[in-house]
Image (cartoon, rainbow, N blue to C red):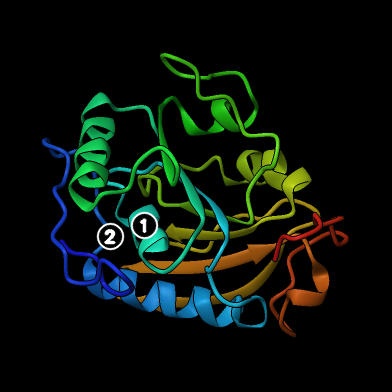
Amino acid sequence: MRVIAGEKGGRRLVAPAGLRTRPTSDRVREAAFSMLESALANKGGLAGAVVWDLFAGSGALGIEALSRGAAYVTFVDQAHGAVSAVKENLAKLGYGPERSSVVCAEALRWVHGLDEGPGGGAVPARGADVVLADPPYAWRSWPALLRALYPFGALVMMETDSEPALPEGWFVHRSRRHGGTLVTLTTCDASQSRPGQAGPGQPGPGRSGGP
């Protein structure tokens, strides 16, 4: 597993020990970030973006965002092994506290502000411009997570094995299948959805500076 592109392109990453983590393959990650940066092209791509990497695992998604110019990434995972792997990868690549933070917490509870994790890690008041979410395929709490993310107006990149259920106010911006993985970009800004891909409900308010 390696960083695909950007300032750390080609650098190797460690994965958490054990069998419960499902790292995104390099091929899928490359395709997913190509789609994400295309969606953000009118905002300069990921340059300067504030990113949350939920269900971080090895941190490969958030580290890819940092390598491609994200200003700051918060990594969230409830598994201690994953948190250790993220910290090891960040240290190896030279990304310190000025560019990143790592929180050991359950992602949905953290977004709700209910779980700050050991030593703190509260949801930043600024929120996020981009949210990367790659939970286990069996996880089915997408409507609850997206409702919690609604006030931030972020562009959310989801990795699933089937089409995720979107709550009212969320719309599909783009989606593409890569083998057994479906990558979906979703937004609460209806103007960013594509014809025939809108989810149910009305557009969300968005947040100034977000996608």
Q: 21 left or right of 106?
A: left
- Residue 79 is situated, as x and y percent measured from the top left of the image, at 29, 27
Instruction: State the image quarter where residue 80 is shown.
Output: top left
Q: Is residue 166 above or below residue 55?
A: below
At label 2, counting other C-alpha atoms closer than 10 Å, the crowd grade (few under 14, some 14-19, many 20 or more) is some
Image quadrant holding the N terminus, namely bottom left
At a point 51% along the width and 24% down the height, the residue shown is 121
Q: Which mark is residue 123?
A: none
Q: 198 left or right of 30?
A: right
Residue type pointed to by label 2: Thr
Which mark is in front, 2 or 1?
1
Image quadrant holding the C terminus, namely bottom right
At a point 32% along the width and 48% down the height, the residue shown is 95
Residue type pointed to by label 1: Leu
Looking at the image, do the residues carrying marks 2 and 1 touch, with CB atoms under 8 Å apart? yes
At a point 45% along the width and 68% down the height, the residue shown is 183
Q: Which mark is residue 61?
A: 1
Q: Nearer the viewer, residue 163 or 65?
A: 65
Q: Is disc 2 placed on a helix, strand or loop?
A: loop
Q: Is disc 1 placed on a helix, strand or loop?
A: helix
At a point 80% along the width and 54% down the height, the residue shown is 207
Q: Which mark is residue 24?
A: 2
Q: Nearer the viewer, residue 147 or 30?
A: 30
